[in-house]
Amino acid sequence: MKKNTLSLKGQTTGTIWASSSFLFIKLHHHTSSSTSTHHHPPPPSTITATVKYSVLTDPLNVLNTWNYSDESPCSWNGVVCQTFLNDIRVTGISLPDFELTASLPANLGLIEHLREVNLSNNSVNGTIPLSLYNATELESLDLSNNLISGEIYEFVGGWKSLRILNVSGNLLVGKLPVNLALLPNLMAVSLKGNYFFGEISGGFDSVKVLDLSSNFITGKLPEHFGGGDVEYFNISHNNISGEIPEEFANRLSTNATIDLSFNNLMGAILESSVFFNKTERSFARNPELFRKPEMKCGGGVL
């Protein structure tokens, strides 16, 4: 199984870049989890402790440090903490690539200042808990390459702070939530390799990376899409139909990586700087989509 990495560590001052087979987010980190002898850590959080209760197998013994007699959970493997005034608070759970077999605890979203959840590349099952939709400070959610099922609900509208969402490589189903496209700070999204259906909504104004490949998405490419800074767009292996709207092309960066392959697009590929030097691979397996003879593709003429 391919690993699609979308990570967030602190404030974003870097750039986003991607290739057609994987995504990377390059982010610079300003740490804010330093402690002081004057701070008084809270007692271990009952909510944080439920994460361990939800784990069925831990072959690498990563949770051996989770000792409930500790004064603070901030010393536990995978628990992220930050300083708020005179208090140290749990702000994240980060346990990627640890071969954990677990389910998502129902009260995960009740961590008061939750900003990061990364349980990628494990065997985590169950549905996204409803409490997580109430985590208004959540900035990064990475559940990729697990066994997560169920839907992503329109409650995502509460994720006003969310910048990175990666749920690729799971068993998620249902319509693409319209409210996802309206989140004001969202920068990178990967829903790749699930069972989502429905149409792509207009919006995604702040998004730079969007991977919706390998789903069951239908309809046409949206005209009012993106804010002009989209650097990676992958809608391959779906059921998108119709012509490529000129307005859609105008919203993509000139050097954007684009993959529209394995769909049902039709008509002429626009004479746009976005498409001018893209290789045939970007448009492959759209039987009724064609390039005008005078347009060059990857240095040659189709």
Image (cartoon, rainbow, N blue to C red):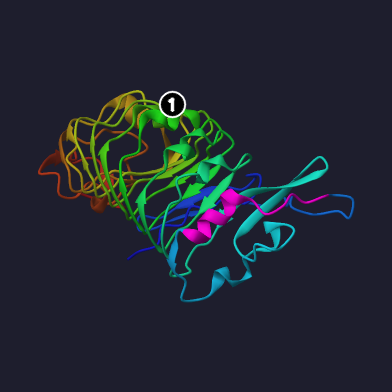
Report the number of numbered marks: 1
Q: Is residue 117 left or right of residue 28?
A: left
Q: Is residue 147 magenta?
A: no
Q: Is residue 9 above or below residue 219?
A: below
Q: Quadrant of residue 223?
A: top left
Residue bearing the label numbered 1:
182
The image quadrant where one finds the N terminus is bottom left
Q: Is residue 72 at least partly visible in the picture?
A: yes
Outermost residue on the left side: it is: 287
Q: Is residue 274 left or right of residue 66?
A: left
Which span of residues is magenta-colored? 40-53
Q: Residue at x 56, y 68 (%)?
A: 63
Q: Is residue 222 above or below residue 262?
A: above
Where residue 220 appears, as percent x and y from the top left, is 21, 30
Where residue 10 appears, as percent x and y from the top left, is 65, 48
Near-viewer residue (286 or 267): 286
Q: Residues within 10 Å of mark 1 (few under 14, many from 20)?
A: some
Q: Is residue 204 at least partly visible in the picture?
A: no
Q: Is residue 197 above or below residue 1?
A: above
Q: Residue at x 60, y 50 (%)?
A: 46
Where residue 214 appears, as percent x and y from the top left, is 24, 50
Q: Residue at x 53, y 30 (%)?
A: 160
Near-viewer residue (149 or 243): 149
Which structural element holds mark 1? helix
Outermost residue on the front side: it is: 69
Q: Is residue 164 left or right of residue 65?
A: left
Where residue 184 appears, as percent x and y from the top left, is 51, 28
Q: Residue at x 78, y 44 (%)?
A: 87
Q: Is residue 37 left or right of residue 293?
A: right
- Name the amino acid type tagged 1: Leu
